[in-house]
Amino acid sequence: MKAIFQISTSNQLRFVNRTSYYNTPETFDTRLFNHLTFQDRDYVPYSQKIQNDDDCWFDFKTSYTDFNLYLVNKSDSSKTTLAYSVAGNETTLTDGTILIYYRCNVDVTALDGCYYIECECVTATLPYQIIWSEEFNVKEEHENTLIIKWGGNSSINDGMNWASVPYEIDRYQQIRIEARIIEGIYNSQKETYEDSDIELTTLNSDPLSIHTLDIKLIPFYLHEKINIALGHDEFYVNNVLYNIDEDIELTVFKEQLLRTGNIQLRVVDYENYNNYTELTGDLPVFADAYFLINATDNMLINATDKMKLNN
């Protein structure tokens, strides 16, 4: 049986195998991640931003039958055991190795401070492994941030199980970054016809709304995360559905391992009146209504169905 503990990069948290770091880092990317998040403070450290009302979860596949998941408090290294559950069908490899698909929900509603996830693999017949997530900073509100959500993998092989029904999404992954949406640019895709009198006639026109995602500073692995998120079926910024048809290019600060810049996003379903948005909210509240009989007597007409008479 092969030793496998796989966490997709389509999850909101980035994970790295810390076991290999204590020996020789396996890849250049792993070294960068460790330097930025855990070891080398010559770089500007970064912790992903999560608010108490944000959704936090991750999926993984593993051949390990014995493992532990912990939420580690960075301030005192205390650990809280995390629960997990089977979230999808088993996968059997050609050599007979069975991978079980799990989901772990991280309740952040009562957290305050910096944390990370530790995955400890302890199956007796497989090599001992320690896998850590990136650090994340939880508090009630992170000012000047917006939230990016994504889901669905009909167009990308991402190792995730977005819903029990194919091509549907029952839950989104998300990250919160310091950024803003600016500069609405309005354009159109048009098909035209020029007749013999050189008169131009519009055959078809689709209006476009293009917005700029202005990013302050993010680490390279969140740049990677946004790029991967844009490959999914649905990509939202502050609950507006966007897409992109060009490459992402950000300015790199090599001495900090951080990046900044702009991404041009196109609004999906802009001016599409075949899709209907269902409105939500509270039911209206009406004041008591009375039927006036005379100056002193009235009839109450409301949900209590009472009629007032002279005493």
Image (cartoon, rainbow, N blue to C red):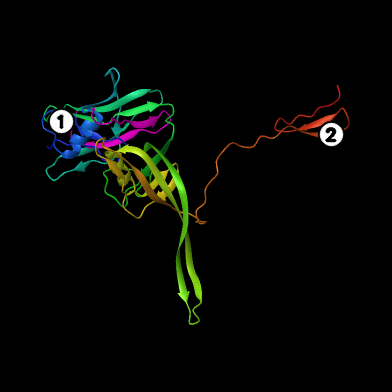
Closer-to-camera residue (60/272): 272
3D distance between C-alphas at marks 2 and 1: 83 Å
Image x and y of residue 158, in percent: 27, 45
Q: Is residue 207 left or right of residue 125?
A: right
Q: Is residue 116 visible?
A: yes
Give the crowd class for mark 1: few <14, some 14-19, many >=20 residues within 10 Å.
some
What is the quadrant of the N terminus in the image? top left
Residue at (52%, 51%) from the top-left corner? Answer: 276
| Number of other residues with Cα within 10 Å of mark 2, as a class: few under 14, some 14 to 19, many 20 or more | few
Say which of 182 and 87 sits in front: 182
Position in image of residue 38 (x %, y %): 23, 28
Number of the label disc, if any, that sits on residue 197: none
| Image coordinates for residue 68, horizontal then vertical, percent | 23, 26
Is 133 on the left or on the right of 274, as rendered? left
Task: Classify residue 67 by image quadrant.
Answer: top left
Q: Which residue is mark 2?
A: 292
Q: Say if residue 164 shows up in the picture.
A: no
- In terms of secondary structure, what is the magenta stretch mainly? loop
Which x, y percent locates residue 271? 51, 56
Say which quarter of the image contains residue 139: top left
Which label lies toward us, 2 or 1? 1
Residue 192 is left or right of residue 36, and the answer is: right
Who is closer to the viewer here, 4 or 197?
A: 197
Query: Label 2 amino acid?
Result: Leu
Name the N-terminal-most of marks 2 and 1: 1
Q: Which mark is residue 21?
A: 1
Mark 1 falls on what kind of element? helix
| Magenta range | 41-66
Quadrant for the C terminus in the image: top right
Residue type, mark 1 in image: Tyr
Circles 2 and 1 in contact, beta carbons < 8 Å: no
Q: Residue at x 41, y 32 (%)?
A: 54
